[in-house]
Image: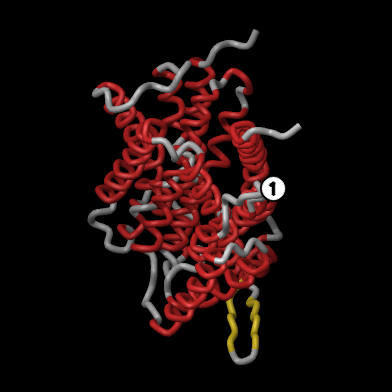
């Protein structure tokens, strides 16, 4: 039986939700293991493993980085490739393709971006070293957020899941822009030109209808290498590659959809857990009250817990109250408030942006980021779970 386009899209959406929620559980386990290792007799081995220098050289060109940065610059490029594929599909034929579907979650995401950033900036306004982390509490971790929502099973209306997922996708798009504009270093013109030539090759492949993914992936590795050398963060290469992989084809075989389907389990169950394992481990031995109660960690916690709910729920209520958008079907105000709380789970993306913001910072700043993100994300998850538990229909 040949499936219609709507059936294919619906099935892909269900698979997406299922993978993201299950991946969130693995993510939690990886983060817990990292914290336990960092505070155990094996802490030295854990640190040495992440700081081990790995060098890859081809001809006279090469890259030499600690294993931690290979994860953050290399593996996370695969994550951003998947984000790019998801964004492309959603814009072309999904939740972001219709104005009436995108208005409410986009405004909610905008509120969830601005308010936490302002709160963090205000708390750190007299801390020149910490103010650069203003974007840390603006992120929402879609895997963690959907994992919290998935606990309630069929009690959650489909429209509420779509609302949360679309907010997280728009959040990811905003994070991409923020990283490109605010967290890129000194630019190398020669490397940018080389990366531009790679993009021209991608354009040519797309223009001539080439559908072999290998051609795009090989070119993508070339672009990633020179973007890394250019000073622009290397993960953005994943977004660029995704933009050129064909989505719609006459014979219904979609390279973009096929790659997205292939990458999902690898990202959900390998890439993100490895990132969490490498970045969540913080040793409490060297952490004092000045770190936990410092402006960086406090700004992150208040931004995630208070700023996200105020921004998301406030903009949602304002848009619906002014008639700009309609409330999602079968949802109530307490349900929407619960989702606004869950949006404060920023774990993966907040850690990632924190690593960029304080790339050259010391132990205190990096520890403050990890502490703040963990406390803020866990608090938001628990508070969101409690509100949804009380507001969702009771199981039969």
Split into 4 quadrants, where in the image is the N terminus?
Answer: top right
Residue at image location 50% in from the left, 21% down from the top: 388
Q: Is residue 184 left or right of residue 215?
A: left
Residue 40's spot in the image, x, y percent? 68, 55
For residue 51, above or below residue 393:
below
Residue at image location 30% in from the left, 41% down from the top: 115
In the rendered view, how is the structure colored? secondary structure
Residue 242's spot in the image, x, y percent? 54, 58
For residue 200, above or below residue 39:
below
Residue 103's spot in the image, x, y percent? 35, 34
Which element type, helix, strand or loop, lies under badge 1?
A: helix
Total marks in image: 1
Residue at image location 49% in from the left, 63% down from the top: 240
Q: Is residue 59 left or right of residue 177?
A: right
**Mark 1 nearby-residue class (10 Å; few <14, some 14–19, many ≥20):** some
Tell me if I can see residue 19 in this picture: yes
Quick one: which residue is furthest to the front in this view? 250
Q: Which residue is mark 1?
A: 265
To which quarter of the image does residue 215 belong? bottom right
Residue 379's spot in the image, x, y percent? 48, 35
Split into 4 quadrants, where in the image is the C terminus?
Answer: top right
For residue 189, above or below residue 166:
below
Quick one: which residue is furthest to the bottom in this view? 60
Q: Nearer the viewer, residue 280 or 254?
A: 254
């Amino acid at each position: 039986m040949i499936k219609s386009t709507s059936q294919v899209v619906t099935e892909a959406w269900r698979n997406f939700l299922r993978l993201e929620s299950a991946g969130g559980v693995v993510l939690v386990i990886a983060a817990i293991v990292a914290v336990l290792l960092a505070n155990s007799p094996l802490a030295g081995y854990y640190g040495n493993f992440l700081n081990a220098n790995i060098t890859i050289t081809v001809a006279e060109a090469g890259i030499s980085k600690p294993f931690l940065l290979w994860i953050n610059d290399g593996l996370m490029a695969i994550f951003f490739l998947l984000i790019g594929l998801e964004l492309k599909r959603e814009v072309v034929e999904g939740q972001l393709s219709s104005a009436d579907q995108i208005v409410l979650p986009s405004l909610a995401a905008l509120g969830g971006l601005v308010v936490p950033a302002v709160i963090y900036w205000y708390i750190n306004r007299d801390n020149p070293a910490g103010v650069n982390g203003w974007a840390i509490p603006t992120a929402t971790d879609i895997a963690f957020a959907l994992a919290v929502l998935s606990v309630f099973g069929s009690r959650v209306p489909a429209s509420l899941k779509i609302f949360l997922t679309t907010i997280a996708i728009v959040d990811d798009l905003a994070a991409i822009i923020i990283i490109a504009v605010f967290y890129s270093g000194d630019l190398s013109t020669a490397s940018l030109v080389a990366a531009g030539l790679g993009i021209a090759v991608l354009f040519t492949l797309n223009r001539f209808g080439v559908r072999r993914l290998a051609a795009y992936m090989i070119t993508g590795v070339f672009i990633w290498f020179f973007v890394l050398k250019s000073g622009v963060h290397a993960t953005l290469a994943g977004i660029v590659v995704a933009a050129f992989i064909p989505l719609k084809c006459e014979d219904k075989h979609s390279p973009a959809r096929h790659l997205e389907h292939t990458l999902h389990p690898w990202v959900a169950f390998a890439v993100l857990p490895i990132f969490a394992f490498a970045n969540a481990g913080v040793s409490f031995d060297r952490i004092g009250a000045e770190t936990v109660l410092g402006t960086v960690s406090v700004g992150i916690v208040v931004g995630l817990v208070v700023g996200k709910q105020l921004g998301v729920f406030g903009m949602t209520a304002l848009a619906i109250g002014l008639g700009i958008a309609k409330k999602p079907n079968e949802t109530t105000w307490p349900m929407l408030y619960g989702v606004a709380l869950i949006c404060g789970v920023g774990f993966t993306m907040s850690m990632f942006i924190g690593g960029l913001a304080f790339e050259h910072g010391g132990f205190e700043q990096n520890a403050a980021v990890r502490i703040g993100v963990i406390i803020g994300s866990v608090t938001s998850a628990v508070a969101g779970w409690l509100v949804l538990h009380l507001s969702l229909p009771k199981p039969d």
